[in-house]
Amino acid sequence: MCPLPQGSSERFCSWRLASPRRPASLIAVILGLVIAFQIRRQLGTGPGTMARIAASISEGDLTVDLGTNGHKAVGAFAAMKVMTEKLQGMVATVQETAEQVASASEQITASAQRQAGGRNAKPPRRKRPALRWKSSPAR
């Protein structure tokens, strides 16, 4: 709503909208939109989405949906997607290794138990070799 001076018409308001200060404001708004678009493009998605994804990953949830909706991931979003995939691979490798260690541990335990079971039974007596004294050569 345009405050009209006394004795002026609606045309005065439309003239005021076209004053020299308005183009500067319009340029500032357009520049702000361009900067926001560039930041979003570098992130690859909106800042809120990036924050949500980063929070999920930091809590250990590597199953977070990084849905690209059929689009190619770009910028920081693409880097986060690659990071998540590599972390998933590392976790899978650690799980495999842990399973192998557990299996080897079970085998060692079973072997130790078999050996301990054999020791509890009395071993067969070994004959001691007879001690022989060497006679010294006659002098």
Image (cartoon, rainbow, N blue to C red):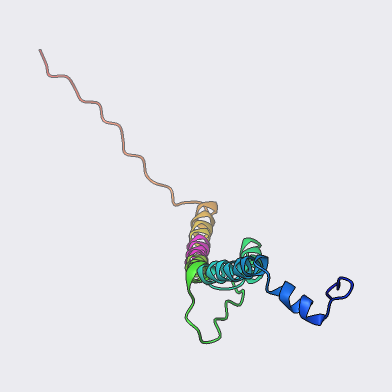
Q: Residue 3 location in percent, x, y?
A: 86, 72
Classify the position of the N terminus by image quarter: bottom right
Q: Which residues are magenta?
A: 93-106
Q: Is residue 127 above or below residue 88?
A: above
At x 86%, y 73%, the residue is: 4
Classify the position of the C terminus by image quarter: top left
> Main structural element of the magenta stretch: helix, strand or loop?
helix
46 or 32: nearer the eye? Answer: 32
- Quarter residue 50 falls in: bottom right
41 or 76: nearer the eye? Answer: 41
User: Residue placed farthest to the bottom in the image?
Assistant: 70
- Quarter residue 59 falls in: bottom right
Q: Residue 5 location in percent, x, y?
A: 86, 70
User: Residue placed farthest to the top in the image?
Assistant: 139
Q: Residue 71 location in percent, x, y?
A: 50, 84
- Quarter residue 24 falls in: bottom right
99 or 123: nearer the eye? Answer: 99
At x 49%, y 66%, the residue is: 83
User: Residue placed farthest to the left in the image?
Assistant: 139
Q: Residue 105 location in percent, x, y?
A: 51, 60
Whether residue 61 is visible to the viewer of this picture, yes or no, is: no
Residue 3, magenta (yes or no): no
Whether residue 20 is visible to the viewer of this picture, yes or no, is: yes
User: Residue placed farthest to the front in the image?
Assistant: 7
Q: Looking at the image, how many numbered discs can be counted on the residues?
A: 0
6 or 90: nearer the eye? Answer: 6
112 displayed left or right of 20? left
